[in-house]
Image (spheres, rainbow, N blue to C red):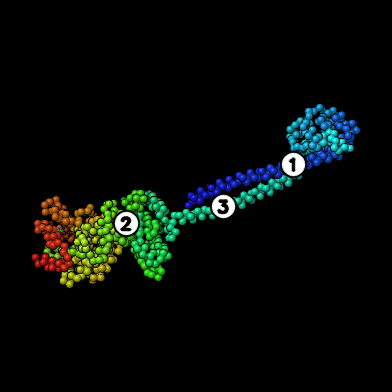
Amino acid sequence: MNARRGWGGVRFTAYLCATLLPVVWLGAVLSHTVTEQVDNAALREGESQAKTLASAAIEPYLDDEQLRTGLSADQQQSIARTTTPLVDHGSVRVLRIRDVGGQIVFDAANPGGPFPHVAREPEVSQAATEGMVSLLTTVGADEVDGSLPNGERVIEAYVAIHANDDPSLVIGVLEVYIPFGSIAAERESSLAQLRMVIIAGLAALWVVLALIVTSVTRRIRSHSRRSEFLALHDALTGLPGRALYRDRVAAALNAAGRMGNDVAVAVLDLDRFKEVNESLGHRNGDDFLRLIAQRLKATLRPGDTVARLGGDEFGLVLPGAVSSSIEDIFARVLESIAAEAELGGVAISAEASIGYAMWPSDAEEPDALLRRADHALAAAKVARGAIVRYHPTSDEFDPQRLRLISELRRAIGAGELVLHYQPKIDVPTGRVTAFEALVRWMHPVRGMIPPNDFIPIAESTGLIGPLTHWVVDAALAQLAEWSQAWPDLAMAVNISARNLRDDLPGWVLNRLANYQLSSSRLVLEVTETSFAADPIRATVLLEELSAAGVKVSLDDFGQGYTSLGSLGHLPVSELKIDRGFVSAMEHSHEDRAIVASVIELGHQLGLTVVAEGVETDAVREVLQALGCDTMQGYLFSRPVPAADALGLIEGINATL
Ligand code: C2E
Ligand code: MG
Ligand code: MG
């Protein structure tokens, strides 16, 4: 903006200079014309003086004779009496009488003669025929008396001398040089005044012109700024439009590159806007979009960009976003949109889907990033109300997968998910101390779908949120139901990394309270990868839950890269050795050694060690010998429906 104003200033100055040129030129022309006028007037004046001289001081002394023969002594004297003082006095520089052929017959400066023979001068014959010839000249411009001050401006006038009795008869020519200075002096002063007036007038004109130009320029500039704004912004919401959005993305990437930050680029689409528009009318639809725009801006930080990409689609740019917390921000965005609003007397709330891509990990170029966010939005829309990050595997967006997403969304609400329970057995007593709740999807067409086939989809679409809510709630409801018979029984549930959001502790404790269950009866199984994305956050959240009494178990331990050193700092009270090691230890000494040292290490850190995937008695015996605390596996029971679980406890306990 400032650079533009600077450039405008330069152009304005250039414009003023350009207008100054013609104004100065006009001034020069005017002043020249006026000078010419003054010169002409002086010439006329000189002519009239010369005429007066001829008629008053010369003609009365002459008769009808041509002057070719010269003047008589009387005539010479009479004429010299009046004219010589004029020359002496300086009011006339030269006064000569010539015959019509041009020869001098009298010279006031030398009345007695002799007179030199001179060449014909055209002015003399012209004056003889036309009566008068005059010109403004400088002394020295032609041959005149050398005694005259050279360079003086004079009016050179030639006047026909007429015979005294016969005014039609020209008998000679009077030649006079009248100093221009005396005639022009007073005119010069008025000329100076006139010049001042011209200069002042033109200067005023120029100033007025400049003022007009300034104000017009300013108006044009503000107008063009306004039309530029309109071109780049959406008229309905005042938000940046698609073109500006792309610019903002590019600018955010540039800035982030310098600062070493990440950038999230997201596309948000309202899920049922068409219905709002159709049922409440377009006016209300417009109001609704404006409201959404306001809410989006209010939810995001001032440095973030909200743009309207058209219809019910909005674009977001969040510079400096941290991948692990970005979905919390988007969840808040969806919440703010979902808040009920009154439109045309009807309370409505909107759902939206968000697809996003992170810079630089998902794409490096602005356009690629936007395309990927669009891709992710397609998947998010299928799940509805979901937040989906772009995923590079192409099958992510294949039609079958997309259909599964949309079905899963429905399945969560439609009661198609069920929990199966697998017992965890305390090694010293051989008793069932807990169940692990494992989700299954009873698909109406495909039959039972195992969790490994749909949990990743739920995780990548944001459906993992509602899914985990459902699982925890159902598991706790089940535990509450079993409480009468088994008051100390614990329940383990699996929690995804993406469930580690700020609202998790509050929500979990609320559910426990709801079923009047002591928090120590809940175990949350998290994998090592949950700590990988945002270790500090995961630690803080799980610590809060531990502090409230909830147990945290590190699932599939050994698969990830948790350094044994950092294990002591994690807020976990249980270690579940990955079943890969457990099942392999029967035949591999190395795996056996690994399991032995994990058990040892876990104990030294004060953790309960669980072995999962125990399938054979041989493995059970080795684990028992190594001091493993808890076992879980097909050897004791596969995961079973709730109805079979209680009988299972009795069966297992009875075998002891
Ligand atoms: P996990 O948490 O490690 O669960 C144990 C998995 O090992 C279960 O598979 C279980 O059936 C299987 N298993 C138990 N004993 C044996 C055994 O002796 N031999 C063998 N080969 N397998 C055994 P499942 O039920 O298919 O679950 C697979 C994974 O899906 C789980 O691994 C867990 O990570 C995830 N999962 C299951 N339910 C949920 C859930 O409600 N939420 C989340 N986030 N993840 C879940
Ligand atoms: Mg588990
Ligand atoms: Mg496991």
Q: Residue placed farthest to the bottom in the image?
A: 484
In what element is the residue under mark 3?
A: helix
Q: Which mark is residue 489?
A: none
At a point 76% along the width and 42% down the height, the residue shown is: 42
Q: Residue placed farthest to the top in the image?
A: 117
Residue at the spot of label 1: 40
Q: Which mark is residue 378?
A: 2
In what element is the residue under mark 2?
A: helix
At a point 65% along the width and 48% down the height, the residue shown is: 202
Q: Relative to residue 28, is residue 169 drawn left or right?
A: right
Circle 2: residue type: Ala
Whole-percent x and y of residue 119? 78, 28
In-front residue for pair 422/484 = 422
N-terminal-most mark, 2 or 3: 3
Q: Quadrant of ligand 1?
A: bottom left
In-front residue for pair 278/272 = 278
Q: Rounded to the nearest whole Å, what is the CA distance between mark 3 and mark 1?
A: 42 Å
Residue at the spot of label 3: 214
The mark closer to the camera, 2 or 1, is 2
At a point 59% along the width and 51% down the height, the residue shown is: 210
Graded by Cα atoms within 10 Å as few (under 14), some (14 to 19) or many (20 or more), the crowding at tag 1 reads: some
Q: Relative to residue 249, is residue 79 drawn left or right?
A: right
